[in-house]
């Protein structure tokens, strides 16, 4: 009696399960590693928000070839240990097909050995040059290299006949990578760095460094950091009455910076992704459509304007989506198709990957903008 | 059964459990979690020797963990040392540094000691960050080689599991031995009343410094193992937050209990898994947990378990008596 | 050519940072002297002051003064709740538990602030404009004058309170010997609570006056709290004026260190000074040597 | 046995002890009495190395021990008990006494961690000895109780057992009878005599005059930091200065 009932239950279950799987194929799992909390949350939070928004949108539109996407987000807190634990969970427990993130170069470098070994494609949202140089088989990235941003600035300086500069970089991953590139490219451009200062990520007063710079023969100042440090620098520059041109990095190309730096922001020149000047782009710009769409969409969801950090996650999702559409959802196929991506016009720029190039952007990814009247002006 | 025999039995059961666990977790992600639990257990035990036994607080222990990781990482990547040799050197150097700074630091008591160790931790963190040429600075040091014994390379979860847990078990055994010896008693005596301990002939000053050095040495071994299993290190893993996390492990597990340290390390390592549902609430839960544990369960979870165990034990005893 | 101008700027910058450290350090000292506790959550009151003012001023569009008053009141209420819920039930706990409890509270307050206000950094408008003032070739902001004057005001008020009012004297008696104080009829519990009230109010005030300069976010409390602590250790816990001197000295050394040695090691300089003082003269530079006790 | 030579101790302007000298004979029981604040405990703290005197010297068997730390003095055979009972509260009674045997053993961190053979032997010796001292003071049946859970009187007894484990030449007892009932006090008196008979010299600070007069061979009276009188119990009882000091106080 009992045995019979058991058999009935089992067969019913079996039928139900089969039916279920026939109706909806299991979702494609995408893992995400973002520094949602901790010191790099200015990267991780918009990235997570964007990724969630994009996945919802793709699913609402019917998914990829009828398959839904499932996004599994893990907070790395900007700590390599947590990033490695997280990536192991994504790969071994959730069995994801591809990974986006991490947000920071440090986290990315920490998880590269794991994804390389597990053979899972990863599209990092961090900017460090060493992520894709040398090229690693399974690792791609969307964030523009600092190596592309620096020449934009130096080009502009050369035009202004600026030869001696002071640099002020933050002592975290972003700043130290920027400093490296500044020093490297200065030689090529024949620009002399005569004052090389740093500040801590939590510092609230940079007048000492700026006073020192003021006393030097620098003709311009380059500050490399992410909010809020550069805002303090901008304010301190104004307080000290320093009139030297102030250049900054793409790390501050967000509305937030202008809000924080207040009057100090006026006149600052920086390389930026096109996202902040989307409306000023010419109609022929291939990125314009994606940019406007992203900015609007983000604002609708989160009530603030989307910035280019969120854009890294947007690009990562769209690149993976494209790869799956072309070649299916196995990790190896996603990797191969990612590498074949040609001229995908996204937020960060127009991406073309190849077997030698997993960064995919040219210096064209950056435009030079100036802050005027609390808004962005495209410098041509 | 005497107390000693019971201790030995518990350790043997624990060892057996550790050795056979991978059989049930083949290829699972939890093997990787257990690797980190092993490293954190070593760190928690190291801190517990200082905090739980000698009663001396350290809010900068992540610095010794980081020192072990960085010395090992730098020696192997920049000077191609063998990882084992690098581990020994990093342990001795960290222990040595602790011994030197231990004399002035451990003269301080209570809140002042807390603040001085915290300051030490921050200074070390700044050094990891700023000596870019040596440590790679904030973006980290990559390409650290795996440990190997001849052709056996510890580059996967299973191998790393056994490597780390064999060393963790050794650390546990040695710490249990130490805690039950005259040194362990002297440390606990210092904890309860330093004055009385000194009057009984315990050289509190030297003993505190010695245990500080031992604690730093174990932390550095853990750091070195961490560096060689992760193959990448960056300063963010060795900051003030991690020092606090270590203290939390010891408190939650149970001050002065070696198995408590394991329990605390295990809970804090897997906790983010469970708190992930809470998203950003985890930091709040974390703070609440620290406060509530200190207020209502100062003996840590291990004392709670012990109470439950005793309650069950006495019930069984009662039953067997009434049956007889 | 303008070496002296540079020096003056370093000194002015240093002193204005130092005044902030002094004010925060003062909060530490008040609780320490009443209870023997070093309140690791002190920095969070600084954060609360800034964030609450910002919340009322920018988000709810209140005028400045009511925003400030509300911010101080709420921070103080948090201080009271902290004392009642976490410190008082633990009377006679060992320093270890107290350190952990205050660290836990600091994490908790920070976490709640993050949930309520998000992770963004915000700028508070300056009290009286952003036009820099020129002094002997160096410049400071009008807000710096607010910082100096409010610091002086608070220190003076405290001096008067502790030296001349009955309650202030009673608090000092508790600090000196709480058993004896309770024997002469002083309510020690109330005095401890009062110390938390004063200290959280001063902390939040410090947070409010610096927010227009340094900006504020949920996590500014950690570093500012630690620097305040360095100030009070340098100056000596037992001396109000010492704390001020300690804060100014710390700010000055940091600024000069950043200017003439290395800005990268600015924070390291502060903590190395902290360690040296703890090793060599734990009672502080500006305090009288205490009698030894067992 | 113990010679205190012109000890002066000044606390931030306050003179706690002024030029106090005294001599303790080997094998004697010496009482130190005096009203509250007379400086008795300060004197003990100086002798045991917890305080450093402003001036003066302390000799143990003609060896100048003025600047010795307490742990060194324990090794030389000088040990004390505390007025407020300083037990190792989280440890068992047995473990408390085992700490007393610290100077009688020498295994270091390494041999303890690795349980080297010598250490195992030593540990066995420590335990046997500790049990022996607990039996000596009649506390053997409390061996496994946590010290914090002991009744007050037993705590005082444990302090004495622990001090005996150091195998001292000289024990300083700081108010050993305070808080004891009369039955416990008379048991204490017997124990103190028994300890003295085993050849250990005893100095005690005590307020219980009956006990002091009963067991002490000689008595030193301190008042306001100065030595007021010295002599046999009988001499002290008849000393007019002592009487007026005590009457004046009450």
Image (spheres, helix red, strand yellow):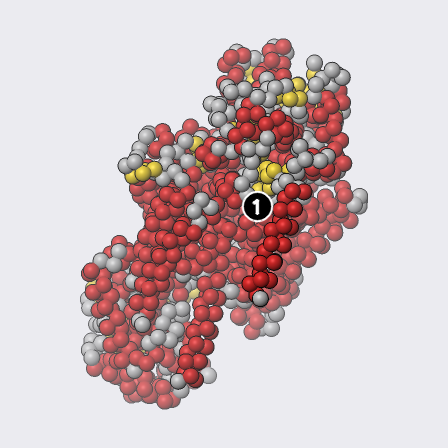
Q: Which residue is mark 1?
A: C222
Q: Secondary structure under badge 1? A: helix
Q: Chain of mark 1?
A: C
Q: Position of residue B123 (x, y in %)?
A: 45, 40
Is residue B296 rendered to the left or right of residue D64? right
Q: Which residue lies at the image location 63% right of the left edge and 66% below the top edge?
A: C190
Q: Nearer the viewer, residue B115 or A139?
A: A139
Q: Position of residue C184 (x, y in %)?
A: 58, 73
Identify the image quadrant of the C terminus of chain A: top right
Q: Which residue lies at the image location 37% right of the left edge and 53% below the top edge?
A: B20
- Asked if B29 appears above or below C98 in the picture, the reply is above
Q: Nearer the viewer, residue A114 or B213?
A: A114
Q: Which residue lies at the image location 58% right of the left edge and 33% below the top edge?
A: A329
Can residue B46 be seen here? The reply is: no
Q: Quadrant of residue D65?
A: bottom left
Q: Nearer the viewer, residue B174 or C70?
A: B174
Q: Quadrant of residue A21?
A: top right
């Amino acid at each position: 009696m009992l045995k019979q009932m058991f058999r009935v239950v089992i067969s019913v279950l079996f039928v139900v399960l089969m039916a279920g799987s026939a109706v909806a194929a299991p979702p494609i799992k995408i893992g995400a590693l973002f520094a949602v909390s901790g010191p790099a949350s200015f990267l991780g939070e918009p990235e997570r928000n964007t990724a969630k928004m994009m996945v919802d949108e793709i699913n609402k539109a019917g998914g990829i070839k009828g398959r839904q996407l499932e996004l599994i987000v893990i907070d790395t807190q900007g700590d390599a240990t947590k990033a490695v634990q997280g990536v192991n969970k994504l790969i071994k427990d959730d069995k994801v097909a591809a990974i986006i993130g991490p947000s920071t170069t440090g986290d990315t470098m920490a998880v590269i050995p794991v994804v390389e070994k597990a053979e899972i494609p990863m599209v990092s949202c961090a900017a460090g040059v060493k992520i894709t140089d040398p090229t690693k088989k399974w690792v791609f990235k969307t964030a523009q290299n600092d190596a592309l941003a620096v020449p934009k600035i130096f080009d502009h300086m050369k035009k202004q006949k600026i030869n001696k500069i002071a640099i002020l970089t933050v002592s975290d991953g972003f700043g130290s990578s920027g400093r490296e590139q500044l020093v490297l490219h200065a030689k090529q451009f024949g620009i002399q760095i005569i004052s090389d200062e740093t500040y801590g990520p939590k510092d609230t007063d940079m007048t000492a460094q700026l006073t020192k710079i003021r006393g030097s023969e620098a003709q311009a100042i380059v500050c490399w950091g992410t909010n809020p440090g550069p805002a303090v620098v901008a304010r301190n520059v104004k307080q000290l009455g320093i009139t030297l041109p102030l250049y900054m990095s793409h790390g501050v190309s967000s509305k937030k910076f202008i809000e924080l730096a207040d009057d100090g922001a006026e006149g600052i020149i920086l390389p930026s992704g096109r996202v902040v000047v989307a409306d000023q782009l010419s109609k022929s710009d291939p990125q314009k459509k994606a940019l406007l769409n992203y900015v609007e969409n983000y604002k609708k969801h989160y009530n603030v304007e989307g910035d280019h950090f969120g854009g890294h996650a947007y690009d990562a999702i769209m690149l993976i989506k494209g790869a799956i559409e072309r070649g299916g959802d196995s990790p190896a196929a996603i990797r191969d198709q990612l590498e074949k991506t040609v001229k995908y016009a996204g937020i960060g720029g127009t991406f073309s990957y190849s077997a030698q190039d997993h960064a995919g952007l040219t210096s064209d990814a950056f435009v030079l903008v100036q802050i005027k009247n609390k808004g962005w002006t495209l410098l041509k | 059964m005497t107390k000693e025999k019971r201790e030995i039995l518990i350790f043997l059961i624990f060892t057996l459990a550790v050795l056979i666990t991978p059989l049930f977790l083949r290829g699972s992600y939890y093997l990787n979690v257990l690797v980190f639990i092993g490293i954190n257990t070593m760190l928690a035990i190291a801190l517990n020797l200082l905090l739980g036994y000698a009663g001396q607080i350290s809010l900068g222990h992540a610095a010794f963990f980081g020192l072990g990781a960085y010395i090992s990482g730098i020696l192997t990547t920049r000077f191609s040392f063998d990882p084992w040799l690098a581990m020994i050197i990093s342990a001795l150097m960290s222990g040595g540094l602790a011994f030197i700074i231990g004399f002035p630091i451990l003269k301080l008591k209570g809140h002042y000691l807390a603040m001085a160790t915290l300051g030490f931790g921050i200074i070390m963190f700044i050094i990891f960050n700023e000596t870019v040429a040596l440590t790679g600075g904030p973006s980290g040091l990559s390409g650290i080689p795996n440990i190997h014994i001849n052709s056996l390379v510890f580059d996967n979860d299973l191998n790393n599991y056994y490597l780390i847990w064999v060393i963790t078990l050794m650390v546990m055994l040695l710490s249990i031995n130490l805690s039950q010896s005259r040194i362990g008693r002297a440390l606990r005596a210092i904890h309860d009343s330093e004055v009385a301990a000194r009057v009984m002939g315990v050289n509190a000053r030297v003993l505190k410094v010695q245990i500080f050095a031992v604690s730093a040495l174990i932390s550095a071994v853990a750091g070195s193992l961490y560096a060689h299993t992760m193959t990448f290190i960056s300063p963010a893993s060795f900051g003030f937050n991690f020092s606090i996390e270590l203290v939390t492990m010891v408190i939650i597990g149970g001050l002065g209990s070696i198995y408590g340290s394991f329990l605390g390390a295990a809970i804090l390592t897997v906790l983010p898994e469970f708190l992930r549902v809470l998203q950003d609430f985890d930091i709040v839960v974390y703070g609440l947990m620290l406060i509530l544990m200190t207020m209502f369960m100062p003996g840590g979870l291990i004392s709670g378990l012990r109470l439950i165990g005793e309650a069950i034990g006495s019930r069984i005893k009662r039953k067997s008596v009434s049956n007889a | 050519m303008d070496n002296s101008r540079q020096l003056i700027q370093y000194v002015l910058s240093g002193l204005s940072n130092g005044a902030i450290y002094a004010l925060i350090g003062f909060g530490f000292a008040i609780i320490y002297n009443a209870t023997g506790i070093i309140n690791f959550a002190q920095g969070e009151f600084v954060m609360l002051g800034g964030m609450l003012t910002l919340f009322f001023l920018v988000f709810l569009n209140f005028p400045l003064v009511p925003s400030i008053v509300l911010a101080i009141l709420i921070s103080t209420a948090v201080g009271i709740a902290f004392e009642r819920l976490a410190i008082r039930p633990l009377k006679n706990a060992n320093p270890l538990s107290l350190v952990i409890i205050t660290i836990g509270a600091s994490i908790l307050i920070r976490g709640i602030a993050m949930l309520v206000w998000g992770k963004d950094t915000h700028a508070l408008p300056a009290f009286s404009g952003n036009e820099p003032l020129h002094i002997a070739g160096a410049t400071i902001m009008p807000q710096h004058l607010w910082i100096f004057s409010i610091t002086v005001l608070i220190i003076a008020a405290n001096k008067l309170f502790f030296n001349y009012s009955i309650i202030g004297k009673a608090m000092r008696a508790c600090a000196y010997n709480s058993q004896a104080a309770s024997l002469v009829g002083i309510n020690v519990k109330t005095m401890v609570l009062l110390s938390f009230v004063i200290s959280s109010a001063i902390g939040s005030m410090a947070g409010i006056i610096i927010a227009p300069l340094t900006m504020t976010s949920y996590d500014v409390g950690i570093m500012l709290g630690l620097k305040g602590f360095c100030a009070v250790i340098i100056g000596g816990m037992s001396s109000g004026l010492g704390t001020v001197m300690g804060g100014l000295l710390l700010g000055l050394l940091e600024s000069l260190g950043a200017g003439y040695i290395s800005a990268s090691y600015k924070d390291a300089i502060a903590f190395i000074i902290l360690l040296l003082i703890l090793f060599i003269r734990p009672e502080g530079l500006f305090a009288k040597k205490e009698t030894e006790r067992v | 046995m113990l010679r205190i030579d012109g000890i002066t101790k000044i606390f931030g302007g306050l003179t706690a002890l002024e030029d106090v000298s005294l001599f303790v004979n080997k094998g004697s029981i010496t009482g130190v009495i005096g009203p509250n604040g007379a400086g008795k405990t300060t004197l003990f703290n100086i002798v045991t190395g917890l305080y450093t005197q402003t001036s003066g010297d302390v000799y143990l068997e003609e060896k100048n021990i003025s600047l010795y730390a307490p742990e060194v003095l324990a090794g030389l055979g000088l040990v004390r008990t505390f007025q407020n009972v300083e037990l190792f509260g989280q440890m068992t009674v047995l473990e408390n006494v085992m700490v007393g045997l610290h100077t009688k053993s020498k295994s270091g961190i390494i041999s303890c961690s690795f349980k080297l053979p010598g250490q195992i032997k030593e540990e066995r010796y420590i335990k046997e000895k500790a049990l022996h001292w607990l039996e000596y003071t009649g506390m053997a049946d409390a061996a496994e109780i946590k010290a914090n859970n002991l009744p007050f009187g037993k705590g005082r007894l444990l302090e004495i057992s622990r001090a005996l484990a150091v195998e001292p030449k000289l024990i300083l007892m700081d108010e050993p009878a305070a808080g004891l009932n009369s039955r416990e006090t008379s048991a204490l008196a017997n124990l103190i005599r028994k300890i003295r008979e085993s050849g250990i010299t005893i100095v005690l600070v005590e307020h219980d005059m009956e006990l002091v007069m009963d067991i002490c061979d000689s008595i030193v009276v301190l008042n306001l930091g100065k030595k007021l009188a010295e002599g046999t119990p009988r001499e002290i009882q008849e000393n007019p200065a002592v009487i007026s000091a005590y009457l004046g106080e009450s």
